[in-house]
Amino acid sequence: MDDMWLRRLSEFIVPTPDELAVLEEAKSDRREFKRNEVISSEGSPVQEVYFLVDGWVEGSVGGDFGRKQLTKIYLPGDFAGMPNVAMSRTAEHLVALNQVTVDAIPIDRLPLLFEKAPRFGCMLFVTAQQERVMLMDHLATVGQLRAIQRVASLLVEVHGRLSALRPEIGNVIDWPLSQERVAQSTGLTSVHINRSFGELARRGLIAREGRRMTLLDLEQLAELAGLPERHFAQQPSWLATCCLPREHRRGRHADKAL
Amino acid sequence: MDDMWLRRLSEFIVPTPDELAVLEEAKSDRREFKRNEVISSEGSPVQEVYFLVDGWVEGSVGGDFGRKQLTKIYLPGDFAGMPNVAMSRTAEHLVALNQVTVDAIPIDRLPLLFEKAPRFGCMLFVTAQQERVMLMDHLATVGQLRAIQRVASLLVEVHGRLSALRPEIGNVIDWPLSQERVAQSTGLTSVHINRSFGELARRGLIAREGRRMTLLDLEQLAELAGLPERHFAQQPSWLATCCLPREHRRGRHADKAL
DNA sequence: CGGAAATTTGAAATCGCTCAATGATAGTGG
DNA sequence: CCACTATCATTGAGCGATTTCAAATTTCCG
């Protein structure tokens, strides 16, 4: 299963071979990172974005001055560093959480992507809005919930995205986040995260053996978190025919897929 | 000053008359709302997005189940409800904070916009990424800062965006948010917001007379908030030539403006 | 095997919450 | 224009969830 990322990429539209070729064309090179290596540093000039092929990446802000806030856990198929396209200096700090493979995309090749595969560009727009919704939910979690609910919320969210990529994992996650990082994501202290994990285990909702995390009662965890359960638009009709390149219009439609 | 919104719309590219015409074409109708009126309701089917012409609008999630989190304060020139394009059911709840004028844009006309004004569509993509950065900063504020810092942060952020629209306001804001709403934005209680406002006033950083809020020491407020001070890309060169419609390519370039 | 990083646990401090009551303000209809 | 009423702002007292500080233990990695 090496094309895990394709599932995520196909969430809103199934890319045509042409569109995938354009994406390939936009990429400059493939890079590997080890756990804790910095992929892109907050404050540096904005030069590229990254397509995550394999591994987990954390996005964060505020590491420079004061405390660090984890804003996103990127999984295979996600584009990391995209928020930086609106900035003159990098806002989102990217660090590998385990062994990571990314394809770098120079930022000045993005127009190419929009020009040669407009429907794909359109899809990137919708994906950006989806990321906003996820960020809004993350904000609601940190702003409105108790500690234990925030932790449950994070577990359920990551597990949901992960099992969309690899349904066969079941309830087990190879969890690469230190408790310190979970704290930075939830707006709590690592000490309190430790106690919260303990409480969840005591309640029989999770089990931990080293790096291995098992969600014993997914339903109860979700209920505890009190998440809204989002339904993202699947292959929306208005997007399927959006931004088709003119040369494609004359021939067969590019959105025949699915 | 009725075209306040144009300043915001011109942040990344100055739209050409053609592009503005396409935007007008996408709009269906203009609507007025009074304070506290609901513009778009969480959970309803996604049908339109809104271009905010005048007034303030709050975006929120979680009003349905449990506690409400304010995710964004929209000001003139902002597109509200955009995150919903990724959803099958509305995620972002929109409420007028004062007398509001919006132009509704049916969601199925968005492709039109991307097709007929690709550069403008490109700009919408960048704007979405900018919103992500602002959301990330909001999250960092709620997750990492003390109560008084969160309040200061909100004041500074809104003032900054407001004075980009109307520099002549100086340090005075006609503040339409109840303390309850400030609480929902900062992840605190209205009681504690009240005490925080009191503390800020006692320190001589703000003054309040009814709805009128004066930021007496903007610099100290910003320092208290400890904000990163974001520099958004101004008229980035890669965007200026992005996604020009093919018919424009043959003639004069559409990005001559600025 | 050694050293650094991460986890775990306890005790005390505190920031912000809850509950509750009073005062001010603004919108509404007579 | 004023009385009426609901919403909003303000203040106090006590409580509690989470933090802070500190130390012991375990795990991970070279």
Image: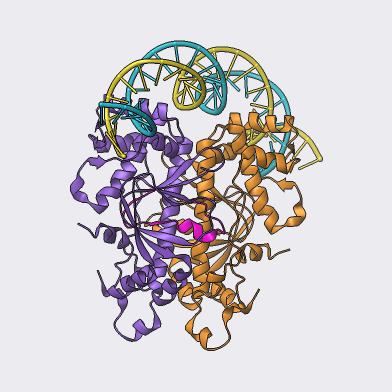
Chain colours: A purple, B orange, C cyan, D yellow
Image side of residue B128 versus residue A169, left or right: right
Q: Is residue B131 visible?
A: yes
Residue drawn at 52 percent across, 85 percent down: B249
Q: Position of residue B122 (x, y in %)?
A: 49, 69
Decide which of B146, D9 is in the foreground and name it: B146
For the record, the magenta segment spans A73-92
Q: Position of residue B156 (x, y in %)?
A: 65, 45
Q: Position of residue A258 (x, y in %)?
A: 24, 69
Decide which of D4, B33 is in the foreground and name it: B33
Decide which of B75, A153 is in the foreground and name it: A153
Report if residue B178 lies within the magenta region: no
- Give the quarter of the figure containing the N terminus of chain A: bottom left
Image side of residue B151 versus residue B86, left or right: right
Q: Position of residue A256 (x, y in %)?
A: 27, 75
Residue drawn at 63 percent across, 62 percent down: B8
Q: Quarter of the image holding residue A52?
A: bottom left
Residue sticking out furthest to the left = A168
Q: Is residue B184 visible?
A: no
Q: From what the image shows, is residue A26 above or below residue A126? A: below
Decide which of B173, A194 is in the foreground and name it: A194
Report if residue A87 lies within the magenta region: yes
Total numbered circles = 0
Image side of residue A96 versus residue B212, left or right: left
Residue drawn at 55 percent across, 58 percent down: A87
Residue drawn at 58 percent across, 86 percent down: B252
